[in-house]
């Protein structure tokens, strides 16, 4: 392990993460973990790259030095961004899984009980089968989630970084709200959001801002087109800045013209759903209970609105195609896991209004010792352009 003083977090932080992972390895009777999930690699080492469409892996033995197997092009990033002293890069002409098997043999790990992340978008079934063939004397077990268990509860260093990210989110959102007007395109709004967010210090987010006007706002994950914004319609905005792969998303809604009574009622509805969630969040409460609190408010509306998704999801490290950690934990029906201090969520009670569009005012929040703290900071209301 190289001692570095120019990493995203302190070496003490990375050593803690590694030690806690190894404790979980003992509990699960795993001698080696091969992590292939880009966010997990980032969490353990600091490495980040949009080039994760090529195979990368970090191998963590129960004892001994961790090492990486990465594409040669990405090895320069491993050198700069991580504390890893050992790396075994592969050339574009080589099979990365064969190189991984050779590295396991070099470090005397080819006969161990090895945990792999079977539930990983970037470790395909074909690649897994090749590894099994290349290492016939190893015992492979699924350890999906073993690294994510550490990511779920943020350290104070992580919380401080997310708070910093939130400032860039707020800058982008303010610019987007100010840019909304009759006659501009959704692309015009997107341009102002990007400019302001980057000028405020944001690096590249894992998802581009969602910008949808009129009835398009009720389409899940709709983002900007060349559509011209019209008087008499809402514009739905969902934005997150990013620093060192950490995100802090936020939704707001702008109405062009004078909202009718149904829009003001929808604003009140979403505000009440958000308040119900915020009042429910505290350590020991289940994810299901938070989801139920917000969902009940929206379901009780006479507007025909509905909560179009889960009520929230864990947020922290994100690499494309997602800025969230919802696969680790979501605030959703029948999820019985309890909240703990320093979990962070994107809280998203929002309403799809038939014939109108989407109305949302979301926040990035942190579970505290006694309740909930809102990290993002921008007035939560229906803005009028």
Image (cartoon, helix red, strand yellow):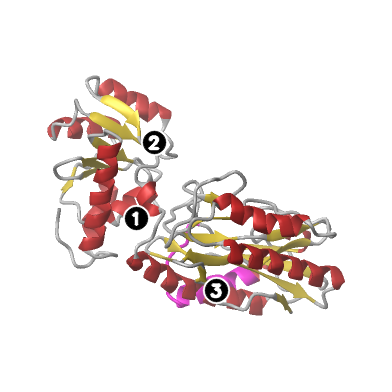
Say above or below: 269 vs 286.
below
Question: How many neighbours does mark 1 have within 10 angstroms: few (below 14), some (14-19), or many (20 or more)?
Answer: many
Q: Which residue is mark 3?
A: 172
Disc number for residue 35: none
The magenta stretch spans residue 110:
no
User: Please, what is the dominant secondary structure of the magenta stretch?
Assistant: helix
Say above or below: 331 vs 250.
above
Disc number for residue 123: 2
Q: Nearer the viewer, residue 14 or 295?
A: 295
The alpha-carbon separation of the residues under discs 2 and 1 comes to 17 Å
Tell me the magenta residue range.
Answer: 189-206
Residue 383 lies in quadrant? bottom right
Going from the N terminus, do you reach mark 1 or mark 3 first? 1
The magenta stretch spans residue 200:
yes
Q: Which residue is mark 1?
A: 48
- At x 25%, y 19%, the residue is 136
Question: How many neighbours does mark 3 have within 10 angstroms: few (below 14), some (14-19), or many (20 or more)?
Answer: many
SS for dot 3 = helix
Question: How many neighbours does mark 2 have within 10 angstroms: few (below 14), some (14-19), or many (20 or more)?
Answer: many
Q: Quadrant of the C terminus?
A: bottom right
Going from the N terminus, do you reach mark 2 or mark 3 first? 2
Q: Position of residue 337 (x, y in %)?
A: 50, 47
Q: Is residue 248 visible?
A: no
The alpha-carbon separation of the residues under discs 2 and 3 comes to 34 Å
Q: Is residue 13 visible?
A: yes
Q: Nearer the viewer, residue 121 or 11?
A: 11
199 displayed left or right of 129: right
Q: Position of residue 375 (x, y in %)?
A: 50, 71
Q: Position of residue 87 (x, y in %)?
A: 19, 45
Tag 2–tag 3 contact (CB < 8 Å): no
The alpha-carbon separation of the residues under discs 1 and 3 comes to 23 Å
Tag 2–tag 1 contact (CB < 8 Å): no
């Amino acid at each position: 392990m190289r001692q570095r003083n120019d990493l995203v977090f302190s070496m003490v932080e990375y050593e803690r993460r590694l030690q806690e992972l190894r404790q979980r390895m003992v509990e699960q009777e795993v001698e080696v973990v091969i992590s292939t999930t880009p966010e997990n690699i980032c969490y353990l080492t600091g490495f980040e790259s949009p080039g994760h469409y090529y195979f990368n892996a970090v191998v963590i033995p129960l004892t001994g030095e961790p090492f990486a197997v990465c594409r040669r092009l990405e090895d320069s990033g491993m050198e700069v961004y991580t504390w890893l002293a050992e790396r075994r890069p592969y050339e574009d002409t080589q099979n990365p899984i064969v190189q991984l098997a050779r590295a396991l043999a070099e470090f005397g790990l080819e006969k161990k009980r090895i945990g792999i992340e079977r539930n990983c978008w970037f470790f395909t079934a074909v690649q897994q089968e090749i590894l099994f063939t290349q290492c016939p004397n190893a015992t492979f077990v699924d350890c999906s989630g073993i690294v994510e268990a550490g990511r779920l509860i943020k350290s104070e260093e992580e919380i401080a970084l997310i708070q910093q990210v939130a400032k860039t989110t707020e800058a982008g959102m303010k610019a987007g709200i100010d840019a909304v007007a009759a006659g501009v395109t959704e692309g015009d709004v997107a341009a102002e959001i990007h400019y302001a967010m980057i000028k405020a210090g944001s690096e590249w987010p894992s998802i581009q801002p969602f910008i949808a006007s009129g009835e398009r706002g009720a389409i899940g994950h709709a983002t900007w087109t060349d559509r011209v914004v019209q008087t008499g319609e809402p514009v739905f905005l969902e934005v997150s800045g990013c620093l060192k792969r950490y995100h802090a998303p936020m939704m707001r809604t702008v109405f062009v013209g004078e909202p009718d009574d149904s829009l003001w009622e929808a604003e009140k509805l979403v505000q009440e759903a958000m308040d119900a969630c915020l009042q429910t969040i505290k350590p020991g409460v289940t994810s299901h209970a938070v989801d139920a609190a917000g969902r009940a408010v929206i379901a009780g509306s006479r507007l025909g609105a509905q909560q179009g998704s889960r009520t929230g999801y864990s947020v922290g490290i994100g690499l494309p195609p997602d800025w969230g950690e919802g696969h680790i934990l979501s605030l959703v029906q029948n999820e019985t896991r309890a909240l703990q201090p320093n979990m962070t969520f994107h809280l998203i009670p929002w309403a799809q209004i038939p014939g109108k569009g989407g109305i949302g005012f979301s926040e990035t929040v942190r579970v505290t010792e006694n309740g909930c703290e809102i990290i993002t900071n921008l007035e939560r209301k229906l803005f009028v352009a």
